[in-house]
Amino acid sequence: MSKRGQIRRHLGTLNDIGGIMGAMKNISLMETHKLARFLAHQHRVLANIEVAAADFLAHHPEIRHQSTIATAEVVVAIGSQRGFCGDFNQSLVQTMRRHWQPSPGQPASLVVVGRRLAAKLGREPRICASFDGPSIAEEVEMVLERLMDALGELQARQGGSGLLSIAVFAHREGESEVSVRHLLPAPSVAPSAPRFAYPPLLNVAPTNFFTELARHYLWAQMHDVFYGSLMAENRRRLQHMEGAMQRMDEKAGELQRKYNLLRQEEITEEIEVIMLSNDALQRSRRTRTDAMAG
């Protein structure tokens, strides 16, 4: 195959890859629009739970003291399930190694969400559970159920009566750095004066009420964390795709110029061959004419 043919085949390959990357970019763009709606709703849910918790704790401050006692520490790291998102997972690993130190006497357990992050962590000895993460918003619910089952198993190992301290390492929407969020003990609200003169009327014991409220709060927080991580992942993927497509366009333009140059050289050679052939034909004709005249 000629060099020009090789370049033409390379250009075709780049065009095919560009089409695939363009489709992936559009999918990520649509996912960010969908996640923006989910996150706005989730922020409102969290705000309502925090208001209810503040009203309750203002009249039952003893519950706050009990809820701050944790018997075991669990770290949840949320990475990506798919690639093409730059240093999304590498920055998570670096942040964890800088800021995560288990408390003395409380060896921490690590739960890893996302196949790509698990591959980055390798044989980290503190990993006690690892499973696939969500690729789209609709998969968050299924992954959360697996995560809650894993947390339930960890609590069962503590005898079932201990309170877990849960910290989450994950990317957040609109933030360039990896954040650390402490989800349990929860809800964590600032002390404030009661907004109402009388405590809320409850149909269950205050401790049971707060336990259920904390469970709902954890569930809502987890949704918020996963949606925020997916949003950051897709935005990082969009940036990565745009940079890759720009570099690919530059490469395709360079190859196209080389292709045109080679084609011009071939045309020039063809013209030269035609002109040389014409000169040879003219000389042959003159030779025959001179021979006939002689």
Image (cartoon, grey):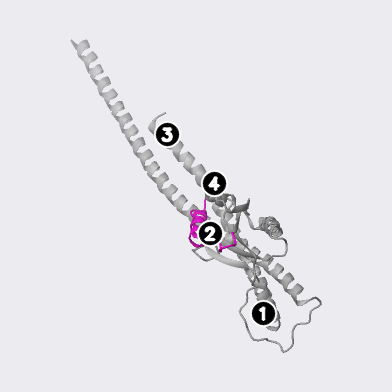
Find the distance from the CA under tag 4 to the CA under tag 3: 21 Å
Q: Element under label 1?
A: helix
The span shown in magenta is 84-107
Circle 4 residue: 20
Q: Indicate left or right for 258 with 103 as reference.
A: left
**Residue 218 in magenta?**
no
Q: What residue is rendered at 48% in x and 60% in y? A: 98
Residue at the farthest left position: 294
Sequence-wise, the earlier of marks 2 and 1 is 1
The residue that mark 3 highlights is: 6
Q: Quadrant of the N terminus?
A: top left
Residue neighbourhood size for the residue with mark 1, other residues' Cα within 10 Å, grouped as few (<14), some (14–19), many (≥20): many
User: Which labelled disc corresponds to residue 54?
Assistant: 1
Circle 2 sits in a helix, a strand or a loop, which is it?
Answer: helix
Between the C-alphas of marks 2 and 3, the distance is 36 Å
Quadrant in which the C terminus is drawn: top left
Mark 3 falls on what kind of element? helix
Q: Crowding at label 4, few (<14), some or many (≥20) Cα neighbours within 10 Å?
A: few
Tag 1 or tag 3, which sits nearer the N-term? 3
Question: Which numbered circle lies on residue 235?
Answer: 2
Looking at the rendered structure, the kind of residue marked 2 is Arg
Residue at (52, 59) in percent of width and height = 96
How many neighbours does mark 3 have within 10 angstroms: few (below 14), some (14-19), or many (20 or more)?
few
In depth, the one of 166 and 43 nearer the eye is 166
The relative height of residue 200 versus residue 228 in the rendered view (above or below) is below
